Amino acid sequence: MTSWHVSRFTAIAIILAVSVMLVNCSRVVFAVLNAPTYAGSYERHADIQYGTDARQTLDLYVPVGSAYRPVVMFWYGGMWTKGSKDWYRFVGAALASSGYVAILPGYRLYPQARFPQFIEDGARGEVGTRAP
């Protein structure tokens, strides 16, 4: 086997190994992504309850010194079976640092909830953030 084939094989093996590690270590990946979010010019209001279930909470990211700002609701993905709003603090921080009020709702997952309950959770979370 030539050295070109060996180095190509090694590169493919490394790429596959890193891919497997990243897939299986999503908590580590999200921890690295979220590390810079602990400082910034925004306020984070975490785990605001909008329903009776433990997953029916939302995080609100508000730019400091803001009166009226546009609002963005960010739904994280996970095929309705996995994920957490806590994994995406970096999104809320980036939006708030850019002048937006960011809402990151949590929602019930399958099999505890079924369609359209996931969607209803998000809608209930959005309504729960409105001022009276």
Image (cartoon, rainbow, N blue to C red):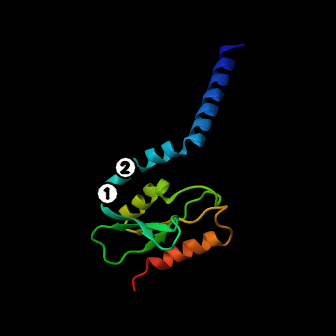
Q: Quadrant of residue 14?
A: top right
Q: Quadrant of residue 63?
A: bottom left
User: Outermost residue, right direction?
Assistant: 1
Q: Nearer the viewer, residue 99 or 38?
A: 38
Q: Which residue lies at the image location 30% right of the left edge and 61% below the top edge? A: 41
The residue that mark 1 highlights is 40
Q: Nearer the viewer, residue 43 or 113?
A: 113
* In this view, 5 is above or below 57: above
- Indicate the amino acid at tag 2: Pro
* In this view, 1 is above or below 42: above
Quadrant of the frame with the N terminus: top right
Measured as percent of width and height from the top left, residue 123 is found at 55, 76
Q: Which residue lies at the image location 63% right of the left edge and 23% below the top edge? A: 10
Would you say the residues marked 2 and 1 are in contact, meaning their CB atoms lie under 8 Å apart? yes
Measured as percent of width and height from the top left, residue 113 is found at 64, 67
SS under mark 1: loop
The residue that mark 2 highlights is 36
User: Outermost residue, bottom direction?
Assistant: 132
For disc 2, the neighbor class at 10 Å (few under 14, some 14 to 19, many from 20) is few
* In this view, 109 is above or below 28: below
SS under mark 2: helix
